[in-house]
Image (cartoon, rainbow, N blue to C red):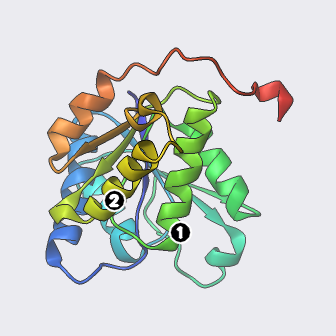
Amino acid sequence: MKSITVFCGSSFGSHDIYKEQAFLLGQTLAKQGIQLIYGGADVGLMGTIADGALTEGGNVIGVLPHFLQSKEIAHKNLTELIIVETMHERKTKMNELCDGVIVLPGGYGTLEEFFEMITWAQLGLHKKPIGILNIDGFYDDLINLVQTMVDKGFLKQVNRDMLLISDAIDDLLEKMKNYQAPTVGKWISKEEI
């Protein structure tokens, strides 16, 4: 993997461990020569992960809709800042630029980005690994809900197994590097979208 998109909160959350782990993830990606793709902001966990990568000399590309740039939250020290028109264009560009996705704690926006990426993988639109860094059990309830989707017949186990989960950065990156996308038939092709 040469580049990873990270989706995370524009806030710090209520526990210091979220900020600490975001910074460490940024540092770890840079040390491993993995380019960071993220939302381009200088606030919350978003700014923290960028700062972590930049302190280790990493390449950091931010993708920011112009309406957020006007609120002066764009990070000023990135390797590159790409300005797009819409939130959907932002996700599309972040997907194009990466070889995998990691989700850190966040709110509605983070969950929406995560679910779109995992849905695209389920539909066969990409074969990239998608990982949750489950810092301090933040995503335990979501992980339980996903298992309920399987248990109640709304999600296939093979699609549940596409989701890589760990509470340790190195372990999650190792799972992502060894990921093999399922070979089950696609529901639709890119041409049908």
Outermost residue to the right: 192
Instruction: Examine the rendered structure and indicate whether residue 140 appears above or below residue 74.
Output: above
Q: Position of residue 22 (x, y in %)?
A: 26, 61
Residue at figure coordinates x 52%, y 14% from the top left: 183
Q: Nearer the viewer, residue 63 or 183?
A: 183
Q: Is residue 40 visible?
A: no
**SS category of the residue bearing label 2:** loop
Q: Which residue is mark 1?
A: 109
Calculate the distance from the C-alpha at mark 1 to the C-alpha at mark 2.
12 Å
Q: Is residue 45 left or right of residue 108?
A: left
Q: Position of residue 192 (x, y in %)?
A: 85, 29
Residue at figure coordinates x 52%, y 79% from the top left: 73
Image disc number at residue 18: none
Q: Is residue 24 left or right of residue 71?
A: left
Residue at figure coordinates x 61%, y 39% from the top left: 120
Identity, as a three-letter code, of the amino acid under mark 1: Gly
**SS category of the residue bearing label 1:** helix
Quadrant assignment for the N terminus: top left
Instruction: Examine the rendered structure and indicate whether residue 140 appears above or below residue 126.
Output: below
How packed mark 1 is, by other alpha carbons closer than 10 Å (few <14, some 14-19, many 20 or more), is some
Identity, as a three-letter code, of the amino acid under mark 2: Leu
Image disc number at residue 104: 2
Q: Position of residue 110 (x, y in %)?
A: 48, 64
> Which badge, 1 or 2, is on the more N-terminal residue?
2
Q: Is residue 19 visible?
A: yes
Residue at figure coordinates x 14%, y 47% from the top left: 168
Q: Position of residue 134 (x, y in %)?
A: 24, 56
